[in-house]
Structures are given as C-alpha cells and as structure tokens.
Amino acid sequence: MKYIRKIFALFCIFAVLSGCKAKFPSQHAAISAGAPESSAISSEIAGQGETSGAAFSANVSQTAPNTASSGSAKMIKKELRCTLFISCNDILKNREKFSEDKLSLVPKDGVILAEKSVEIKNGETVYDVLLRETKSNGIPMESASAPVYQSIYIKGIHNIYEKDFGASSGWTYTVNGKQPPVGCNQYQLKNGDKIQWLFICGA
C-alpha cells in the first residue's frame, strides 16, 4: 500500500506539473500571436495618421487665402482723387451791371461748391465728376449735347445759366489752371487734377 500511495502521489504531482506545462505554452503562444496583430494595428493607425496629416496639410494649403498676393493686389490698387471747385464770383465783380433780382441767385461769396477732394475712377471725365457731385450735393445742373463736336456743354449750374449775365456769359472749366481744348465729357482725369468750373460774364 505504501508503494501504491507513493506511486499515486507521484502520478498526481506529475499530472499537476504536466497540466501547468501544457497551459504555459498556450498562453505564451496567444500573447506571441497577439503581438504582431497589435503591431499591425499600430502601423495601420500610424499610416492613417500620416495620410490624414498630409491630406489636412494639402487642404489647408488649398483653402488658406494667399495673404501675400492679396496684400500685393491692395498695394497695387491706388486710390485716384481730384479736387472740384465751382464759383460764379465773376458776377459779383461786375455786380453794378446787373439788377438785384438777378443777383439774388448768386451766393454772397460767389462760391457754389467749395473746393473738395473727390474720388475718381480710372477713365472718368470732368463731366462725370461734375454730374455726380452736383447730384450728391443737391446743386441743380443742366447740360446739353453738341453732336457735331461729340461733346457736352454746361448750360446752367445753381440756376445760373449762360447769357443770364451778358450775351457771351456762360460756364467754362479749367484743369490745373488751364482751359482744355475739348469738351468736358472728353477730358479724362488723372490723379491729383484740379477742376474749376467758373461762370464768366464776358464782355
């Protein structure tokens, strides 16, 4: 019996040890088998991250405004301006020739529109500026066309008309102190030009 018990005890120990040895390899194998899968997932995630990052960078570069180009465009586009002045002061200089009824239309200082700086667009003419500014300032203005000369002339400003103060009286304009040889609708303005509309009584 003693031998049988010893043999049985050894068998149990062997069986237990054999069971443990059988389990350890299976767990190790499972861990070892899982490692490549984990590495593959990590690699896949990393790859996706790189692809997403590249795509994001591409999208940003496509959608982001080109501030340098925009800034250059703004710098290139320069604002054009000129000055405009309208006066009938020549009437006051000859006031003794006219009745008080006629003189009632004339401002006390002879200035209908004080000199002001106005913005102009490329290609605009003296007439374009006069038409826009008289409208915006509520000043009556009437013009007429001369088809033969393909030009426009000004009949009246501020209800003061040609021939109202003399047979040869009327409106004339100068640019930078000189009277151009063309109609006001034909003279294209440049940046910094000074326009004066003056009523001249004449002889």
Image (tube, rainbow, N blue to C red):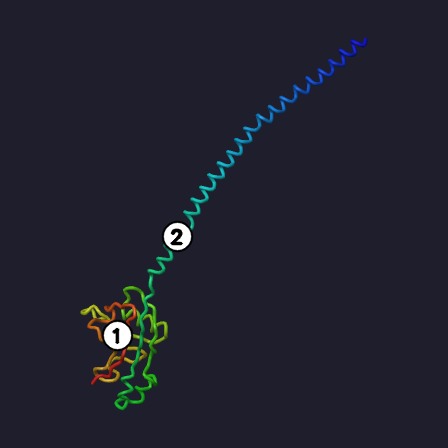
State left or right for residue 46 relative to residue 165.
Answer: right
Instruction: Report helix, strand or loop for mark 1.
Output: loop
Q: Are marks 1 and 2 in contact (CB under 8 Å)?
A: no
Identify which residue is drawn at 74% across, 15% down: 12
- Quarter of the picture containing the C terminus is bottom left
State left or right for residue 19 relative to residue 132.
Answer: right
> Of residues 89 and 65, which is closer to you in this image?
65
Residue 136, position as x, y percentages in the image: 36, 72
Instruction: Report helix, strand or loop for mark 2.
Output: loop
Name the quadrant containing residue 200: bottom left
As measured in the structure, the alpha-carbon distance from the residue carrying label 1 to the one carrying label 2 is 41 Å
> Of residues 189 and 15, which is closer to you in this image?
15
| Amino acid on which disc 2 is placed | Asn
Position of 146 relative to 70 (above/below): below
> Of residues 189 and 149, which is closer to you in this image?
189
Name the quadrant containing residue 144: bottom left
Residue 179, position as x, y percentages in the image: 22, 75
Crowding at mark 1 (Cα within 10 Å: few <14, some 14-19, many 20+): few
| Amino acid on which disc 1 is placed | Asn
State left or right for residue 127 relative to residue 56.
Answer: left
* Residue underneath mark 1: 176
Name the quadrant containing residue 78: bottom left
* Residue underneath mark 2: 66
